[in-house]
């Protein structure tokens, strides 16, 4: 979707709200969101199955009170942060700073 064109065509408060809701509920947004989390937290691109799973779980996150998936953005972040994939490289004997540095987030 051409989001800039959509905003220009509906350039009033109600129209902009509709365009923003449309963007936040789009496959484009959910794909970008999940891909960014994988790259930032896990240091890799998502596999096809993981991307499909998490984007489907998000449902329609941009519509207040209308999330028809079982997860919202915060849940997806928490699940990825709590995943075995992230936990395995953590060494509890190391300091917080050492662990962050080892994960590339220092």
Image: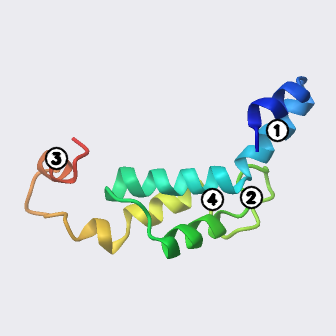
Q: Which of 93 and 73 is in front in this view?
A: 73
- Which residue is denoted by mark 1 in the rendering? 19
Q: What is the C-alpha distance between the residues marked 2 and 1? A: 14 Å
- Tell me the residue at 19%/63% (across/down): 90
- Which residue is denoted by mark 3 in the rendering? 101
- From the image, state whether disc 2 or disc 1 is nearer to you: 1
SS of the residue under disc 1? helix
- Looking at marks 4 and 1 on the same chain, the residue that comes earlier in the sequence is marked by 1
- Looking at marks 4 and 2 on the same chain, the residue that comes earlier in the sequence is marked by 2
**Residue 18 location in percent, x, y?**
86, 39
SS of the residue under disc 3? helix
Q: What is the C-alpha distance between the residues marked 3 and 1? A: 40 Å
- Is 87 left, or right, of 75 in this rendering? left
Q: How many marks?
A: 4
- Looking at marks 3 and 2 on the same chain, the residue that comes earlier in the sequence is marked by 2
Q: Is residue 64 above or below residue 42?
A: above
Seen from this angle, which residue lies furthest left? 93
- Tell me the residue at 79%/44% (across/down): 21
- Is 70 left, or right, of 99 in this rendering? right
**Residue 74 location in percent, x, y?**
55, 55
Q: What is the C-alpha distance between the residues marked 4 and 1? A: 20 Å
- Which residue is denoted by mark 2 in the rendering? 60
In the rendered view of the protein, which quadrant contains the N terminus?
A: top right
């Amino acid at each position: 979707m051409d989001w800039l064109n959509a905003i220009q065509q509906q350039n009033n408060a109600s129209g902009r709200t509709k365009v923003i809701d449309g963007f936040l509920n789009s496959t484009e947004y959910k794909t970008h969101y999940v891909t960014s989390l994988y790259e930032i937290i896990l240091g890799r691109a998502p596999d096809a199955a993981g991307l499909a799973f998490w984007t489907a779980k998000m449902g329609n996150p941009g519509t207040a009170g209308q999330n028809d998936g079982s997860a919202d953005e915060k849940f997806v972040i928490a699940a990825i942060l709590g995943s075995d994939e992230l936990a395995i490289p953590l060494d509890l004997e190391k300091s917080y700073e050492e662990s962050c540095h080892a994960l590339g987030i220092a």
